[in-house]
Image (cartoon, rainbow, N blue to C red):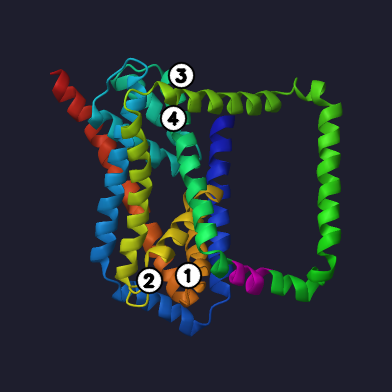
């Protein structure tokens, strides 16, 4: 009962964050701007949104193929159909609770392919670790290539308002010194209390997580098809990129945007999805603010953000529900 209440509170919490971001953005809009956003939805070319969904499903097929490569290092060879169904059911579960999907898809493989849960969960850690490596590589690549645009935006939208309100330019050194002092204080406390901290369950969980990530990354060296694994890891993000890029053509105001804008939206939009479960509410806001860098009206960016988010969410809902239905049926037929 207690666990159910906690789970319900988590869902309400993330939904509340999403609603909060939606309210913040809409409260700043005039009635004309709200009408403009609505018209963008009405007159959008949804053919491109459908293409985006198809590309998204392809990315998850590649993810399933990559996961099979990792599972084969454990001595198991699951059917690609079951692996794909497990991945999609996992994403569907993630829409309800953070990190529930990783547990769910490992449970699916344990039931239908007899892959031990703890072993398959180790491969999921490897997957996530590799994805984070690729993400950070793309993040810094985006930062380097488009530094001028991003720097100009930060100067206008962040440092400028802060400077007016808090005299930020003159006090930046003081803030930096305070930050370093606080950081030094925490480091000193950690050093003095390290023996007591090690006895805490939270410390053990964090330590175990870091050790698990390290061993997970190290296990990549045992893969029989390393180049295929690397290719598929890159291909997954290329397909994610195409999902975003194709949605540009759904609106006339964004059809002219190029590969650089799509890369920026992919990176910053992914951060929104990481921060708030599923990116609800915050994802369209981030897309709108990012497209301001590319001289696109915030109302158009907001509408595009909702189109991309809706495409991704529909893909997970449709594929996830179909996987729940087909998984037991197809496996029953194969066993028969």
Q: CA distance from mark 1 to mark 3?
A: 43 Å
Q: Which residue lies under the disc numbered 4?
A: 124
- Magenta segment boundaries in residue numbering: 151-158
Q: Is residue 155 magenta?
A: yes
Q: Sort mark 1 into few (<14), some (14-19) or many (20+) by Cα contacts within 10 Å.
A: many
User: Do labels 1 and 2 touch, CB within 8 Å?
Assistant: yes
Q: Main secondary structure of the magenta part?
A: helix
Nearer the N terminus, badge 1 or badge 4?
4
| Tally of numbered tags | 4
Q: Nearer the viewer, mark 3 or mark 2?
A: 2
From the top left corner, tell me how far across and down residue 43 is, in percent: 29, 76
> Going 45% across and 71% down the picture, which residue do you hit?
301
Q: Nearer the viewer, mark 2 or mark 4?
A: 2
Residue at coordinates 33% horizontally, 39% vertically from top-left?
231
Q: Picture quarter containing residue 248?
A: bottom left
323 or 259: nearer the viewer: 259
For the residues labelled 1 and 2, the Cα–Cα distance comes to 9 Å
3D distance between C-alphas at marks 1 and 4: 33 Å
Which residue was labeled with disc 3?
A: 118
Mark 2 burial class by Cα count in 10 Å: few <14, some 14-19, many 20+: some
At mark 2, the secondary structure is loop
The correct choice, above or below, for 233 with respect to 199 in the image is below
Give the labeled residue for mark 1.
291
Which callout, 1 or 2, points to the residue nearer the camera? 2
Q: Which mark, by number, is residue 257? A: 2
Discs 1, 3 touching: Cβ within 8 Å: no
Which structural element holds mark 4? helix
Between 105 and 152, the one nearer to me in the picture: 152
Q: Position of residue 132 (x, y in %)?
A: 50, 41
């Amino acid at each position: 009962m207690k666990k159910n209440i906690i789970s319900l509170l988590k869902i309400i919490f993330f939904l509340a964050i999403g609603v909060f971001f939606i309210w913040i953005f809409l409260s700043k809009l005039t009635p004309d701007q709200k009408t403009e956003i609505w018209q963008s939805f009405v007159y959008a070319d949804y053919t491109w949104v459908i293409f985006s969904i198809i590309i998204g499903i392809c990315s998850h097929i590649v993810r399933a193929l990559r996961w099979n490569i990792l599972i084969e290092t454990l001595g198991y060879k699951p059917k690609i159909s079951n692996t794909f169904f497990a991945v999609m059911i996992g994403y569907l579960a993630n829409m309800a609770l953070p990190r529930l999907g990783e547990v769910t898809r490992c449970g699916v493989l344990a039931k239908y392919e007899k892959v031990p849960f703890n072993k398959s969960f180790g491969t999921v850690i490897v997957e996530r670790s590799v994805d984070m490596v690729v993400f950070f590589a793309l993040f810094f690549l985006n930062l380097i290539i488009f530094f001028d645009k991003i720097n100009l935006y930060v100067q206008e939208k962040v440092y400028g308002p802060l400077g007016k309100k808090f005299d930020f330019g003159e006090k930046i050194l003081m803030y930096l010194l305070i930050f370093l002092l606080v950081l030094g204080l925490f480091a000193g406390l950690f050093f003095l209390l390290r023996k007591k901290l090690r006895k805490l369950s939270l410390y053990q969980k964090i330590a175990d997580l870091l050790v698990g990530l390290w061993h997970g990354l190290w296990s990549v060296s045992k893969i029989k098809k390393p180049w295929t694994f690397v290719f598929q890891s890159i291909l997954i993000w290329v397909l994610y990129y195409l999902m975003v890029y194709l949605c540009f053509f759904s609106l006339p105001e964004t059809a002219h945007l190029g590969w650089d804008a799509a890369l920026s939206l992919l990176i910053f939009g992914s951060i929104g999805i990481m921060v708030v479960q599923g990116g609800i509410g915050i994802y369209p806001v981030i897309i709108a603010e990012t497209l301001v860098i590319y001289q696109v009206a915030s109302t158009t960016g907001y509408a595009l953000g909702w189109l991309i988010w809706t495409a991704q969410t529909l893909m997970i809902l449709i594929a996830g529900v179909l996987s729940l239905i087909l998984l037991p049926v197809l496996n029953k037929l194969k066993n028969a």
